[in-house]
Image (cartoon, rainbow, N blue to C red):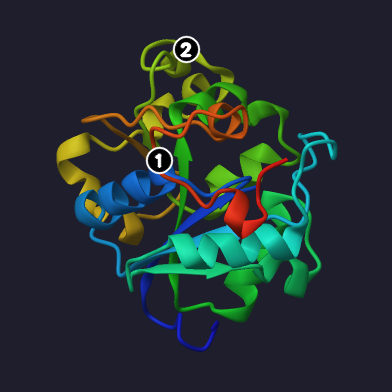
């Protein structure tokens, strides 16, 4: 997999995927189109350190369900964090860059994550190592731009019209991708809202 990454522009979308849903596919498609990426990797986390174990489906079930749910050949579902032995995003990115030095990795996150990323372990290392793309998500559209991370790197924000060059920009650099939003939420899905399409009980991913 990492050999295949050589020279490619790859968006990294990390998370629990508990479960994978239409919102993940929606952001992935936006990233492919707006950032000029070759593919997006869904990095299914064995256990998100900021989320409780209670209500979390087993890792293998979440990984298998995400693979069934990802219908595009440009979306690659992986449990590579387990293979690398990493738990935190900053460590995962460092290991990926070491093992695939010619790949152009871009970290993908929603506006809600930009609001709280300063709580992540070595969060500044993420911005210093790879370009970051932030996707609009209600109701965080404006509040996230006043977040600690946005303020810290405000001078390194790339205009949206230059987003397709993000992957080849030297970090720290980030951009905010405005546009249509998707309402899907893994929490809402686990609570029984089936409007968005997801890998549900038949896939063993609901809590």
Nearest the viewer among 193 and 24 is: 193
x, y percentage for residue 64? 61, 67
x, y percentage for residue 141? 36, 17
Q: Residue at position x 18%, y 45% from top? A: 162
**Crowd class of label 2 (few under 14; some 14 to 19; many from 20; radius 10 Å):** some
- The mark found on residue 23 in the picture is 1
Quadrant in which the C terminus is drawn: top right
Q: Is residue 3 above or below residue 53?
A: below
Can residue 56 be seen by looking at this rendering? Answer: yes
Name the side, left or right, on which 46 lies relative to 26: right
Q: Is residue 52 above or below residue 44?
A: above
Q: Residue at position x 63%, y 39% from top? A: 124
Name the side, left or right, on which 112 lies relative to 82: left
Please, what secondary structure does the residue beneath circle 2 have? helix
- The mark found on residue 146 in the picture is 2
Q: Give me the C-alpha separation between circle 1 and circle 2.
A: 24 Å
Nearest the viewer among 84 and 101 is: 84
Q: Quadrant of residue 78?
A: bottom right
Q: Is residue 207 above or below residue 166?
A: above
Quadrant in which the N terminus is drawn: bottom right
Q: Quadrant of residue 191?
A: top right
Which callout, 1 or 2, points to the residue nearer the camera? Answer: 1
Nearest the viewer among 165 and 25 is: 25
Q: Residue at position x 45%, y 60% from top? A: 69
x, y percentage for residue 72? 32, 67
- The mark found on residue 131 in the picture is none
Name the side, left or right, on which 117 lies relative to 36: right
Please, what secondary structure does the residue beneath circle 1 have? helix
Can residue 44 be seen by looking at this rendering? Answer: no
């Amino acid at each position: 997999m990492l050999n295949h990454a050589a020279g490619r522009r790859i968006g990294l979308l990390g998370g629990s995927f508990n479960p994978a849903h239409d919102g993940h596919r929606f952001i992935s498609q936006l990233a492919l189109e707006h950032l000029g990426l070759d593919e997006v990797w869904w990095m299914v986390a064995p256990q998100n350190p900021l989320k409780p174990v209670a209500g979390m489906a087993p890792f293998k079930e979440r990984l298998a369900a995400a693979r069934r749910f990802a219908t595009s050949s440009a979306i690659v579902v992986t449990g590579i964090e387990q293979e690398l032995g990493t738990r935190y995003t900053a460590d995962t990115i460092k290991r990926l860059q070491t093992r695939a030095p010619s790949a152009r990795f871009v970290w993908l996150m929603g506006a809600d994550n930009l609001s709280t990323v300063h709580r992540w372990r070595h969060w500044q290392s993420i911005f210093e190592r790879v370009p970051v793309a932030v996707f609009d998500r209600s109701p965080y559209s404006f509040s996230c731009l006043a977040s600690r991370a946005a303020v810290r790197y405000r001078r390194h924000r790339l205009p949206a019209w230059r987003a397709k060059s993000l992957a080849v920009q030297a970090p720290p650099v980030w951009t905010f991708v405005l546009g249509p939003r998707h309402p899907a939420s893994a929490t809402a899905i686990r609570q029984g809202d089936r409007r968005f399409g997801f890998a549900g009980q038949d896939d063993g991913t609901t809590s």
